[in-house]
């Protein structure tokens, strides 16, 4: 009868160990599933961050290209402005010469025939220079339109870059939280395994002890 009691204690201890182990396995399985789910979320978020960083890099490259184009257009515009200023100076000089000739003819100080020919030549030169100045002014207006278009594009690109950077910042914060969750789950899993191991060892020792005690009582 005493042996039967010892045997019952041993059987009970074994059952308790098995129940504890099964419960621990179930808990670990749940933790593992949470870890895998969190890891998938983290990987997806990290992939999104990489895509956004590539997008920002491409947008920044386009921004730099536009800036170079704007600098070139402004330099060309400045050159055209200088050319127009020089043309207007030449036009003014020729118009003064023409006016002096007209006054000389009117006062009888110059031959009308010779003066008329020179005035005709001056008129031709002045008209040509005015046309050249007008063409360059049209080129300036065209470049102003191109610069304005690029400036609008720059504003849109910068807005897109800022938005992408904000999304990256938010995702990085989310990634930090996901990583913290994974670390906590891993720590919980490790702690659970340790506790179960200790319980299993203690119960096993208890089972052996009960078995020995039962044998001695026999």
Image (spheres, rainbow, N blue to C red):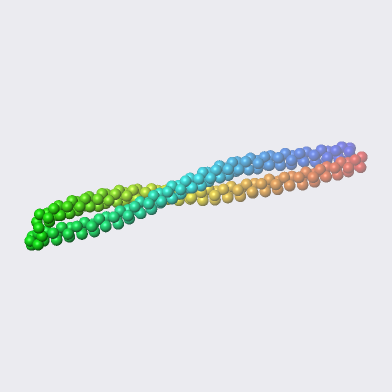
Q: Say if 137 sits above or below 37 in the image.
A: below
Q: Is residue 90 left or right of residue 179?
A: left
Q: Which residue shows up at 67% across the image and 40% down it?
A: 29
Which part of the image, by quadrant, shows the C terminus? Answer: top right
Along the line of sight, the residue nearer the viewer: 23 or 59: 59
Query: Percent position (x, y) of residue 126?
Result: 19, 53
Along the line of sight, the residue nearer the viewer: 64 or 85: 85
Q: Which residue shows up at 19% across the image and 57% down it?
A: 94
Along the line of sight, the residue nearer the viewer: 33 or 206: 33
- Camera sees residue 204: yes
Q: Is residue 22 left or right of residue 183?
A: right
Query: What is the quadrant of residue 39 in the picture?
Result: top right
- Camera sees residue 52: no
Q: Is residue 171 left or right of residue 153?
A: right
Q: Is residue 57 left or right of residue 116?
A: right
Query: Percent position (x, y) of residue 132?
Result: 24, 50
Query: Percent position (x, y) of residue 83?
Result: 29, 55
Query: What is the quadrant of residue 107 in the picture?
Result: bottom left
Q: Which residue shows up at 20% across the image and 59% down it?
A: 93
Q: Give the mark count.
A: 0
Q: Which residue shows up at 78% across the image and 43% down it?
A: 200
Along the line of sight, the residue nearer the viewer: 56 or 23: 56
């Amino acid at each position: 009868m005493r042996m039967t009691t010892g045997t019952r204690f041993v059987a009970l201890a074994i059952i308790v160990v098995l129940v504890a182990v099964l419960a621990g396995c179930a808990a670990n399985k749940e933790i593992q599933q949470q870890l895998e789910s969190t890891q998938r979320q983290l990987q997806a978020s990290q992939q999104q961050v990489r895509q956004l960083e590539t997008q920002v890099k491409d947008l920044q490259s386009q921004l730099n290209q536009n800036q170079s184009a704007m600098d070139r257009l402004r330099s060309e515009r400045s050159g055209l402005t200088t050319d127009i200023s020089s043309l207007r100076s030449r036009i003014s000089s020729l118009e003064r010469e023409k006016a002096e000739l007209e006054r000389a003819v009117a006062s009888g100080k110059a031959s009308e025939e010779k003066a008329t020919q020179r005035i005709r030549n001056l008129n031709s030169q002045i008209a040509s220079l005015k046309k050249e100045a007008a063409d360059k002014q049209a080129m300036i207006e065209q470049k102003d339109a191109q610069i304005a278009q690029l400036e609008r594009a720059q504003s849109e690109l910068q807005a897109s870059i800022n938005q992408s950077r904000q999304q990256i910042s938010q995702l990085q914060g989310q990634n930090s939280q996901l990583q913290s969750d994974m670390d906590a789950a891993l720590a919980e899993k490790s702690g659970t395994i340790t506790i179960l191991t200790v319980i299993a060892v203690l119960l096993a020792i208890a089972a052996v002890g009960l078995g020995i005690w039962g044998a001695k009582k026999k």
